[in-house]
Amino acid sequence: ETGVTQTPRHLVMGMTNKKSLKCEQHLGHNAMYWYKQSAKKPLELMFVYSLEERVENNSVPSRFSPECPNSSHLFLHLHTLQPEDSALYLCASSQDQGFYEQYFGPGTRLTVT
Amino acid sequence: GENVEQHPSTLSVQEGDSAVIKCTYSDSASNYFPWYKQELGKRPQLIIDIRSNVGEKKDQRIAVTLNKTAKHFSLHITETQPEDSAVYFCAASKNRGSTLGRLYFGRGTQLTVWP
């Protein structure tokens, strides 16, 4: 698959579990993002990576831990989540930070039980 | 930080009619305004964007207008078709400062086009 891919597409986890979301972009982009999309709310930016360095962390709880091992891959490590963390998690990439189109992945639908 | 308000939250139109979605922003330094379309179960995709040095941009049936003085921008869809049915998100961004390139999204508008 070309563009931005995400795995898994669906995830159900208990509050004591540890899991990871994976994002991969095949576009040669330098910036990658994690967003949270909840019903009736704006898309919430969680993390921004530019050239594998984290440039923004929007007061996201420490139970969410990002990792960017290279410019093509982005992970979101999850542990001891809460039911209110259930949402669609979208990864996106862009050529660079700034006024560039952000290409979104299909998202991971996360349910915390 | 920036605050983007979007209205209406839902919009129903008859096929062939026009649809208008409006957004306001709070930070006068914002100078880039993209619109994303998200069809049911699919990812958001950019459909049009505008920068603050122009007041209007058009691409076939869609157009965006920007009023910097009033700090609002709008999406206009003419001759709507059922495949235009989706959630539309507006966003605002600026090209300087610690929030370089960060997109602040509105809450979205669910557009339904009835055949």
Image: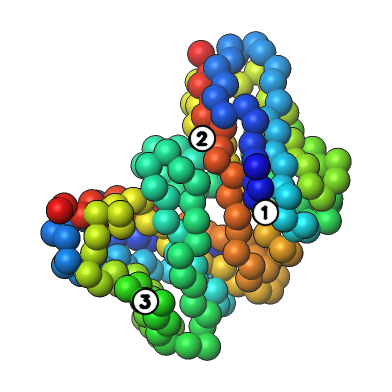
Give the residue furthest to the front.
Answer: A1
Secondary structure state at the residue bearing disc 3: loop
Q: Residues within 10 Å of mark 2 (few under 14, many from 20)?
A: many
Which residue is labeled 3 in the image?
Answer: B60
Image x and y of residue B95, in percent: 65, 74
Quarter of the figure that contains the N terminus of chain A = top right
Image coordinates for residue A7, horizontal then vertical, percent:
65, 31
Marks 3/1: CA–CA distance: 26 Å
Residue A82 horizontal side relative to residue A94, left or right? left
Question: Label 2 vs label 3: CA separation?
Answer: 32 Å
Name the chain letter of the residue that bears numbered label 1: A
- The mark that comes first in sequence, 1 or 2, is 2
Residue at image position (46%, 59%) is B36
Instruction: Report the residue marked by disc 2.
Output: A88
Instruction: Specify the color scheme.
Output: rainbow
Q: In the image, which disc is placed on residue A93?
A: 1
